[in-house]
Image (cartoon, helix red, strand yellow):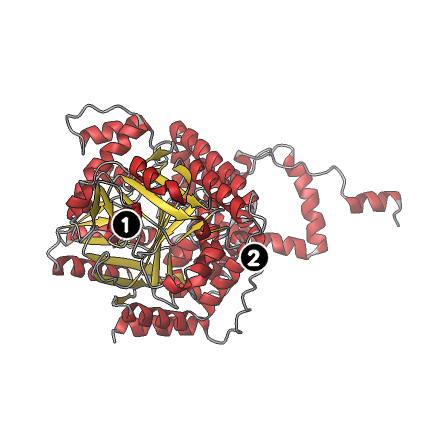
Amino acid sequence: MSAAREAILAAVRSATAGATAPEPVARTYRSAGERSQRERIDLLGERLIDYRATVRRVGAAQLGETLEELAPGRIGIPRGLPLEWRPAGAVEDDGLGAHELDALDGVLTGCTVAIAETGTLVLSGGPAEGRRALTLVPDLHVCVVAAEQVVETVPEAFAALSDSALRPLTFVSGPSATSDIELKRVEGVHGPRRLVVVIVEEE
Amino acid sequence: MTSFPDAARVALGDTQLRHNLRNATATIRDKRARVVAEVPDWEELRNAGQAIKADVMQRLDEYLLQFEASVQAAGGLVHWARDAAEANAIVLDVARSHGATEVVKVKSLTTDEIELNDALAAGGVHAIETDFAELILQLDGDWSSHILVPAIHRNRSEIRDLFLRTIAVGKDLSDDPHELAETARVYLREKFLNAKVGVSGANFGVAETGTVVVVESEGNGRMCTTLPPVLVTVVGIEKLVPTFADLEVFLQLLPRSSTGERMNPYTSLWTGVAEGDGPQEFHVVLLDNGRTRVLADRVGRQALHCIRCSACLNVCPVYSRTGGHAYGSVYPGPIGAILTPQLVGVENAKSLPYASTLCGACYEVCPVKIDIPAVLLHLRAEVVRKVGSTPERVVMRGLARVFGHARLYQWAQRCARVVQRPARRLPGPLATWTRTRDLKPVPKETFREWWSRERGA
């Protein structure tokens, strides 16, 4: 292997030689939360609105018509998106080019897990989530969250993601934003400028 | 480099800069305090973060090898670079091998540290900074003054004028931040959609899985790491964490400490190459560039624990007045004052360990509990040891002698009483001390004199 590799490893070893073994890491922080499902959903909604996302809570029966209303125009969808979610203008992503993605009006996907405390949606490239570029280039992202996907804390989300660790993951907490001009928050720079979250609850 | 006091003097005379800085640091400081207060186990998270980083440093060779193997197993290519020149050559080589004359780049302190953009330019490749603030600085040939909000020393009208001169020539543009952001969006979108090569840094690398993490707000990070078919990521060797689950600690600590948000808008995690999703050629460059030297110092090593949140800048009474430029390095503020001298050698940055009042606010807000004041003191001792005889040292030696001998001390006290009356200010080089301070009056009578007069012999 390269000389640089050997030199760096040797320097690391000489720098750390003779030291005592490190203390085991004490994980005394909270792993699970204590809220009920209803409270978790309330909190998730609150936090997302704080980021200026749009939040809708619907029963499973109204999901189709809600998505029809919230995702108008030519809407990109991953190939595994459930048939009953697909709006009239659905365009299946069969490897659309970057410029074709740019020409879409929006994108509609599901997610893997949602974190209530931080108002975060996690996408892991599953069948209903699609590849990363799909949820990045279009200007509107409509994301469907099932009630049972909502966890309270970040550690709970990582536990739920342990099988997806090797897949590309995207944590989305609100629409794209910058505060670079005099610290004034502006939504929408490069990612979707509008994030719409539809939470599906039991009737 | 210019000494801190000299560089700071210029900054302190700039009232606009001081106004912007005061505003920015106070705003972010308050936001951070609010969102940290709502986390009941914040101290436990800090302790875990500190312990994980200490473990990484202690077993860094194992974690580096594990990370290398994991990235390779996932289809990525791993390079090692001892210094800036080696790292830059690797990135340039990748860009050239794909015939790229432009690369899109995510804001990264590590690539600023190695001056990658200049090296690429010298090799005929233009690196486009895509973070909004970095773009502003790049267009103006300026450089960052704050880790998190690099263009904080610029106001909206300056940005508007800059855009009219560069990327929006002849356009009708107001100084409304929405319009300015839209201008950058339109300009950069074409760059993203057509880029062949993306370049990024990394906030974390996971040894267990080979996963790389980029934390950001605007979406430019997602663009650069997703759309180009080729991606090169430069990672400082200290950025590793042992396991995927360790991220649950740092992704709680970092956003709240950094922007004062519960979570930043976008965090991207990827492992090697994913079929049909994102870049199909992925390079990681593991960078030393002085880090192993820092690692060898048992006290100073903790500077490598830094997760670049910038919380210490915002609470620092020195930084919030001088701004980042005075620190003469890409790493400003308290963390820069302990990291830069160690990376480049204390003899090359000997004024930085003194760029602090040792108030300790930086230590209190640090999400991984780096004891910055302790390292500052340690480095001050190093400066004295390495830099050799200075007037200060001569004075201190003399004082030590006086304090070490009772008769000499008593004689000095009597002399001081006589001398102090005409001398309100100290003479010669010592005048620096009295220029901004009053010389403390010597008491008319010492305790010993009083004792011997009242209860004496």
In this figure, which residue is indicated by the disc labeled 2? A29
Using the rendered image of the protein, determine whether residue B233 is visible from the camera's viewpoint: yes
Q: Where does the image place residue A16, in percent across and percent down from the top left? A: 45, 71
Chain on which label 2 sits: A
Q: Secondary structure at mark 2?
A: loop
> On the rendered structure, is B432 left or right of A10?
right
Label 1 crowding class (10 Å Cα cut-off): few <14, some 14-19, many 20+?
few
| Amino acid type at mark 2 | Tyr
Up the image or down, B175 lies above or below A153; here it is above
Using the rendered image of the protein, determine whether residue B333 is visible from the camera's viewpoint: no
Q: Where does the image place residue A69, in percent across and percent down from the top left? A: 31, 35
Up the image or down, A107 lies above or below B405; here it is above
Q: Residue at the spot x=41%, y=45% of the render?
A: A200
Q: Nearer the viewer, residue B16 or B411?
A: B16
Q: Secondary structure at mark 1?
A: helix
Tell me the number on the disc at residue B63: none
In this figure, which residue is indicated by the disc labeled 1? A83
| Marked residue nearer the N-terminal end (1 or 2) | 2
Q: Residue at the spot x=35%, y=36% of the render?
A: A180
Q: Nearer the viewer, residue B265 or B134?
A: B265
Q: Nearer the viewer, mark 1 or mark 2?
A: 1
